[in-house]
């Protein structure tokens, strides 16, 4: 069975006129006529989605009969494919990207600060200008400084589904 016949048969089975289906599907009546008579080879997915919804037909089946490939079908069948949804996902990834960059920069600055404290400590040890207690105190302080660099980045603020 071809696309036009499937739509026409289902429409007639439900006792819906072509004009009424066109109206409730927000499609021009002439366009619906072209689809049903198979003059429109690859109808717009938006039209197919509306027809499928109003006739309780599978959008996937209509798209296959219309000649759409599997990638098109998978995208159109997704419940999550609105422009608004993709915009939201893009904003989420953008926020994630900038937050990661900020986190890396913060850890880099912290690492340089630790390097400076260690360099000072080494210099003091080499010049024998520091007691063992002071060395231990400085090392404990360096451990406190470096600890944030060892923490994992928190992904709970991002929705990657």
Image: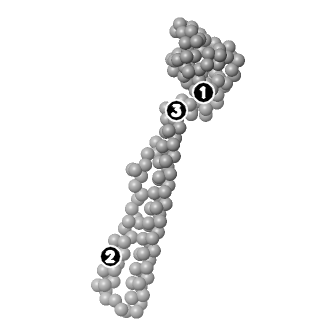
Tell me the residue that label 1 is attached to: 45
- The secondary structure type at the circle numbered 2 is helix
First along the sequence among labels 3 and 1: 1
Residue at image x 59%, y 11%?
A: 18
Determine the image quadrant of residue 137: bottom left
Taking depth in this image into account, of 94 and 114 the one nearest to the observer is: 94
Q: Is residue 99 left or right of residue 22?
A: left
**Badge 2: residue crowd in 10 Å (few <14, some 14–19, many ≥20):** few
Label drawn at residue 78: 3
- The secondary structure type at the circle numbered 3 is loop
Q: Position of residue 98 (x, y in %)?
A: 49, 57
- The secondary structure type at the circle numbered 1 is helix
The answer to whether residue 45 shows anywhere in this view is yes
Q: Which image quadrant: the N terminus?
A: top right
Q: Is residue 18 left or right of residue 97?
A: right
Q: Position of residue 31 (x, y in %)?
A: 64, 19
Rendered view: 90 above or below 3: below
Nearest-to-viewer mark from 1 and 2: 1
Nearest-to-viewer mark from 2 and 3: 3
Label drawn at residue 140: 2
Residue at image x 56%, y 31%?
A: 76
Q: Position of residue 50 (x, y in %)?
A: 54, 22
First along the sequence among labels 2 and 3: 3
First along the sequence among labels 1 and 2: 1
Quick check: marks 3 and 1 in contact, CB under 8 Å?
no
């Amino acid at each position: 069975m071809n696309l036009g016949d499937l739509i026409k048969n289902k429409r007639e089975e439900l006792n819906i006129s072509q004009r009424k289906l066109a109206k409730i599907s927000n499609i021009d009546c002439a366009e619906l006529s072209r689809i049903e008579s198979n003059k429109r080879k690859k109808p717009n997915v938006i039209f197919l989605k509306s027809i499928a919804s109003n006739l309780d037909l599978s959008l996937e089946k209509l798209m296959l009969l219309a000649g759409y490939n599997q990638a098109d079908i998978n995208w159109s069948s997704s419940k999550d494919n609105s422009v608004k949804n993709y915009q939201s996902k893009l904003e989420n990834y953008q926020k994630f990207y900038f937050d990661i960059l900020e986190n890396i920069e913060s850890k880099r600055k912290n690492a340089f600060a630790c390097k400076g404290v260690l360099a000072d400590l080494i210099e003091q040890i080499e010049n024998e200008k520091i007691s063992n207690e002071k060395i231990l105190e400085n090392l404990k302080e360096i451990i406190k400084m470096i600890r944030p660099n060892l923490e994992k980045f928190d992904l709970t603020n991002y929705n990657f589904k």
